[in-house]
Image: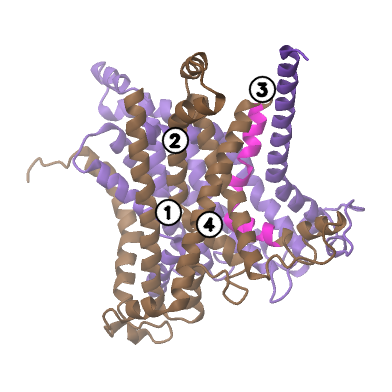
Amino acid sequence: MRGWKPAPHILLLLPAFVVLAAVVVVPLLLSLYSSFTPFRLTRPDSIYTFIGFRNYLRLFADQEFWVAFGRTVLLLTIALNLEMVLGLFLALLVEKATRGQRLLRTIMMFPMMFSPILVGFQFKFMFNDNIGLVNNALQSLGLTDRAIPWLIDSQLAFTSILIAEIWSSTSVFAIFILAGLMAMPKEPLEAAKVDGCTPLQSFRYVTWPFIMPFAYIAMTIRSLDIARAYDIVKIMTDGGPAKRTEILWTLISRTAYSDARMGLANAMAYVAIFLSILFTILFFRQLAKARQQIGAEW
Amino acid sequence: MDENQTNRIKQILLKIGHLVGLFIAMAIICLPGLWIVLSSLRPTVEIMAKPPVWIPESLSFDAYIAMFSGVGQGGIPVLDYFRNSIIISVTSTVIALAIGLAGGYAFARYRFRGKTAIFLGFMLTRTVPGIALSLPLFFVYAKLGMIDTHFGLILAYVALNVPFTVWLIDGFFRQVPRDLAEAAQIDGCTRWQAFWQVEFPLARSGIASAGIFAFLISWNEFALASQLTRSTNSKTLPVGLLDYTAEFTIDWRGMCALAVVMIIPALTLTFIVQKHLVSGLTSGAVKG
């Protein structure tokens, strides 16, 4: 081994490997193991009892779990799509502005600075049925004479959470799409105009393909951090009323910390992790595809 | 009406529509934040008033004074939370940045087998939801006696931030032409010198913004902090917000004031880096 030196890139990547292994990978392996045990925090011995796939079987037969799972997927799908569309509109509006663009861009980034837990409290405050801004405004304008139970009615609570989620994350999309719009060369657009494209056509066939990779970067970033919805839901309704806004992550934390059933919660956590990974891989692949297309055109 | 005139009217209408749309969008973005600031300055009676009081009659900084004057008067130990937040965020940012610098440089400058797979693997560790990660971490930390310590939270945040700092810094080093460092090496620099004297200064502002990004993530994190902290020893501001909620009531004014205190550092820092942030994330991803 005399004179053997590891390649520099291995040395450089080593610290990242060590930290991620110690804090993420090893604990996750532990939780994988404990998802095969009836582990309860109140009975530490129970971690040594191996029960195979019983936790998972229990989960897959549990209707409450599947409802929460479906609701999570629904929430994410609606939220991500709406954020994308609204972000696109916002970016187009800002890009069109002739004056004060710097200021507009700064304002646009505003919601990104809010911690998700702050977003939760802020919207809990605004949607409060008694003293909230939304109800006060509606009543003062005479649009309704009774208090609308935003966070108490199950349908409305889901909508309110969706609004909070969209408010906080649309700017991520808007910023990246705007970056794409600003990086776009102007010649192809002019050429399309000369060739007689309508504005809609030139948007569809010239602008959109160009900004698509940027939209997918935003999607990827969002999907990496997708569980931030937990903070918002936790604060706004904590899964209530009567579990009508229960999502996967609030269900996990309740099972683990309130019911102290760690084994079962870890089994749920694994389902949640696979859901996140699925979303991420989906967008990474789209990103790669969009990037290839751009590469061919550049 | 001739065609010129219709066109002109159409133009003006379009312009007005654009301005109105822009105004509404910006109002929706700003309103919640402004409402929080306003509420933190109003007396509780006015916040609770029915029918609502729209035009504030008296504004005061009472909520802030109460908050910073200790446990007895204001209810919650904000200063402790603030100190914890600063210590934890700054330390974890510095460490994550150092690790990210090494990793990002490796991704930007070296060719090796499995590069894409490793990069994707790093990113995947970031997708693990905080609450899912908190279960095993809680167990391990409890065994090691690391619950409710600064060290435990710092370690967790470093791991949380490393994937993003690697991604961002990788992007910034790609923007620095490879030839520069090579030229410096031909002129007699070692690789180490070439890095510190040529490449690092060029990527510096980008690296700083990666740091601020990491800081904000630690500053705002809640899911892990709420489970891994117990007392004023290590509770951070996001967890401290919960102190204003009781079983059935919430001290809205106090909470709004704390929210403002939390948002001001985040606001200032984001303004500083907004430009670099986008260019770093996109150059890493688009130019592949």
Q: Which residue is mark 3?
A: A98
In x, y percent, where is residue B49? 87, 64
Q: Which residues are magenta?
A: A101-124
Q: Say if mark 1 contacts mark 4, CB within 8 Å.
A: yes
Residues marked 4 and 3, same chain: no
> Dot 2 corresponds to which residue?
A212
Residue B221 numbered mark, or none: 4
Residue at image location 51% in from the left, 67% down from the top: A247
> Disc 3 or 2, which lies upstream in sequence?
3
Marks 4 and 3, how far apart at CA = 37 Å
* Residue position marked by numbered label 1 in the rendering: B160
Vertically, is B223 above or below A199?
below
Chain that the image shows in brown: A
Cα–Cα span, label 4 and label 2:
30 Å
Question: SS of the residue at dot 4?
Answer: loop
Q: Amino acid at mark 1?
A: Leu
Main SS, magenta residues:
helix
